[in-house]
Image: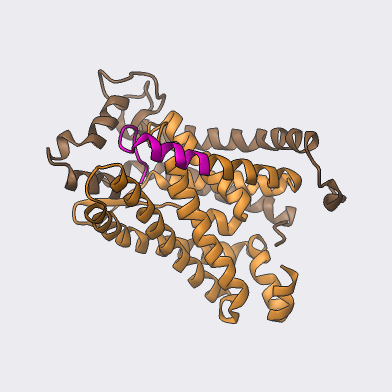
Amino acid sequence: MHIPDGLLSNNINIASAAVSGGLFYYFNGRLAKTIDDAGLNIAGALTAFVFAAQMINFPVGFGASGHFLGASLLMIALGAPLGFISMSVILVIQSLFFADGGITALGSNIFNMGVMGGLVPFFIFSGLNGAVGAFKTRAGFSILAAACAWISVFSASLSCGLQLGFSGVAGVKTILSTIVFIHCFIACAEAAIVFVLLNFLTAVRPGLFEKYYKSFEDKPAETAAANR
Amino acid sequence: MNFAIKSSVIKNSFYIIIAAAFVAAMFSPLASQNPDGLDWTIEKHSPAGPENSSAGDAEKSKTEEGGEPGYFIFGDYKTPFIKNESVSTVFSGFAGIVLILIFFKFYPLAARKNASSSRPGAGDNLCR
């Protein structure tokens, strides 16, 4: 879903870059206050993994392929500030060194994959994770994360389609229906990958996710919610 | 929300995830050659067909002859000095992983510098 140069209108690129840049500045500032070397190590490793996993395109039928997005995984594992920085770093490196995603469209790509594909599903995830008891078990946690991974690809393709439509690539309705249709299938794969990865990670390294369910297992729901 | 993670957990997980990243990069030559969701969409709606779609042109200008040769070191996930396609792709993946790790190695220095020069709310963070 990496938009190349020359596809979107300048206005859309500038507006998206302003939103993405502003969020990067904000999260960077928040992170600077609570920076923690151990957390950054794991962030680096996970970011590198998501980057590598994004290289593997899998066929989804209709002559199209898709690849892992990983934004929801990064946000859930690292939290919104570090997750957003990590996703932005991947997109910047892909754009500058790998010609994957245009430099002028970088702001739009960060908006689509970092904000719509990352922050939006993450806030849905944290809201439901804190509010619904069933999501506080390990299985419930993984299912909720997988659902948010599906939403992640869906909402990213939605905003990508709107940007393409309003840039005049094709009619808004036409392009939206096509891009969202194909990404619904890619989203299923994303959800499956996130489900398997989180099941594995929570089994071998439960401490990584203790922020979500150590508190759920040790304390009743009301206490966990009050501690947030 | 508290996002602090125990350091013993980090140490072990770090190497496992890094290893997984390198393994994923090694599988990258097996990636499907079909256009991805976005390219597929654009090809469908490009009146002149896939060959002349604007996305195709934009990709070509960056990675193929006559575009901007050498401007993107690993353009199209290929390493310039390696002829074997698969090895070239895998190596570019390794390079990307290293670039990301380098960023996260130096990020704390930059972030701390930024924090110490402008930290109006330092009172809520006395333990660090």
Residue A3 figure quarter: top left
Answer yes or no: is residue B23 visible: no
Q: Which residues are magenta?
A: A1-19
Lateral position of residue B37 relative to residue A33, left or right: left
Choose between A214 and B23: the one closer to the eye: A214
Image position, residue B33 (x, y; %): 25, 43
Image position, residue A19 (x, y; %): 52, 44
Lateral position of residue A95 relative to residue A127, left or right: left
User: In the rendered image of this protein, does residue A100 appear above or below residue A226?
Assistant: above
Lateral position of residue B117 relative to residue B20, left or right: right
Image position, residue A195 (x, y; %): 47, 66
Image position, residue A29 (x, y; %): 69, 43
Residue placed farthest to the left in the image? B48
Residue depicted at 32% across the width and 51% down the height: A161
Residue B80 figure quarter: top left
Residue depicted at 38% across the width and 27% down the height: B79
Assess whether residue A68 is covered by the magenta stretch.
Answer: no
Assess whether residue A4 is covered by the magenta stretch.
Answer: yes
Lateral position of residue B99 relative to residue B106, left or right: left
Check the rendered structure and report the hue given to chain A.
orange
Answer yes or no: is residue A153 visible: yes
User: In the rendered image of this protein, does residue A158 appear above or below residue B15?
Assistant: below
In this picture the colour scheme is by chain
Residue B84 figure quarter: top left
Check the rendered structure and report the hue given to chain B.
brown
- How many tags in the picture? 0
User: In the rendered image of this protein, does residue A185 appear above or below residue A94?
Assistant: below
**In what quadrant of the picture does the N terminus of chain B appear?**
bottom right
